[in-house]
Amino acid sequence: MAQTLNAAKKHVASRTLKKLHWNNSTLLRGDVIAAVAALKSEVGQNLQIIGSGNLIQTLQAASLIDEYNVWTFPVVLGRGKRLFEAGAKPGALRLVDS
């Protein structure tokens, strides 16, 4: 798994990082919505978000998420952050698989 992630092309959205040290990583600079929209317009692989509820909500508000693959694990630790916070735009989601 580590070899696959290290070899994959990665685009990192960060408010604090100035440079990246992870192999094949590119820092998205400036407006993350414009940067992701530009990436989506390129021909190639699908984009995936791993581990960023804040980024998901930002892109969701900009209608830039086409598909959700939600993995749940049977562990509850406090309240946590909701995927669809109050104020999220309703969308026409359709269950594709379960």
Image (cartoon, rainbow, N blue to C red):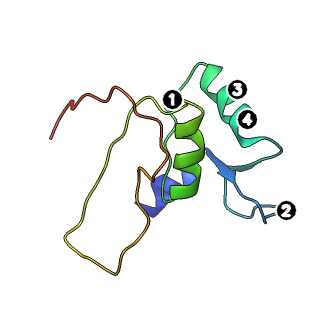
Could you tell me the amino acid type at mark 1?
Answer: Gln
Return the residue at label 3.
38
**SS type, badge 1:** loop
Q: How many numbered markers are drawn?
A: 4
**SS type, badge 2:** loop
Give the Cα distance between marks 3 and 4.
5 Å
- Which of the marked residues, 2 or 1, is nearer the chain's N terminus? 2
Image spot of residue 2 (x, y percent)? 46, 63
Residue 36, relative to residue 18: is it above or below? above
Residue 39, relative to residue 1: is it above or below? above
Could you tell me the amino acid type at mark 2?
Answer: Lys
Give the Cα distance between marks 4 and 1.
16 Å
Instruction: Choose mark 2 or mark 1, whichever is in front.
Output: 2
Return the residue at label 2.
18
Residue at 39% in and 33% down: 67
Marks 3 & 4, CB-CB < 8 Å contact: yes
Q: Left or right? Give the position of 44 relative to 30.
A: left
Instruction: Choose mark 4 or mark 1, whichever is in front.
Output: 4
Callout 3 crowding tier (Cα within 10 Å): few <14, some 14–19, many ≥20: few
Callout 1 crowding tier (Cα within 10 Å): few <14, some 14–19, many ≥20: few
In the orientation shown, which residue stands out farthest toward the front? 87
Return the residue at label 4.
35
Give the Cα distance between marks 2 and 1.
26 Å
Q: For the C terminus, give its image quadrant.
A: top left
Of the pair 96 and 8, the residue shown nearer to us: 96
Return the residue at label 1.
45
- Which of the marked residues, 2 or 4, is nearer the chain's N terminus? 2
Image spot of residue 73 (x, y percent)? 23, 66
